[in-house]
Amino acid sequence: MANVKRKRINLRKELEEHFRNPDLESEQTYLGHDWWYIPTLLDFIEDNHSIEYDLDLTSIDLGVMPWRCKSMLQFIQHMIDIECVDFKYPIIISPGGWVMNGWHRVAKAILSGKSTIKAIRIFELPKPDGTNSPDADEE
């Protein structure tokens, strides 16, 4: 068999390239029926001088599935995202302790054998960018 060069696939741009682009639907986070663009949360964190700290990974509820995977392709896309993230960005934690942004980094940290991850906790949420009605169709 000929020497085949494997090309690494990256289906998303680097985090820093699109975190500040509110037009990307994939860069929203949900809490109940409310949702925020990630740039809204990042601006709120910056405006409120939120402090980064080391969060023990055992304190994160892993009994949830943060993504809606309806196909193997969607699951693989998340696996690629996990593989490609780095830890230079802290995860964002809601007032109630929910990971609002950073599940891929949490997964990578656990798979890498880390015991803590950099985090920023928001103690008061900004006004949501949108709200879905309780009877809205699920994706």
Image (cartoon, grey):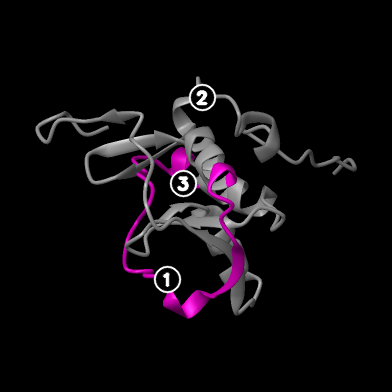
User: Can residue 14 be seen from the camera position used here?
Assistant: no
Amino acid carrying mark 2 in the image: Pro
Three-letter code, disc 3: Phe
Q: Residue furthest right?
A: 3
Q: What range of the chain is rendered magenta?
A: 46-75
Q: Which residue is mark 2?
A: 22
Q: CA distance from mark 3 to mark 2?
A: 24 Å
Q: For the view shown, which residue lies furthest in the left direction?
A: 135
Lower position in the chain sequence, tag 3 or tag 2: 2
**What is the secondary structure assignment of the residue under circle 1?**
loop
Q: Residue 7: horizontal and vertical position, in percent?
A: 78, 38
The answer to whether marks 1 and 2 mark residues whose Cβ atoms lie closer than 8 Å is no
Front residue of 17 and 44:
44
Which residue is label 1 attached to? 60
Mark 2 neighbour density, 10 Å: few (under 14) some (14–19) many (20 or more): some
Horizontal and vertical percent position of residue 126: 38, 41
Q: Amino acid at mark 1?
A: Ile
Query: Which mark identifies residue 75?
Result: 3
Q: Position of residue 131 (x, y in %)?
A: 24, 31
Count residues near mark 1 (Cα–Cα under 10 Å), then give few for <14, some for 14-19, many for 20+.
some
**In the image, is residue 13 above or below residue 82?**
above
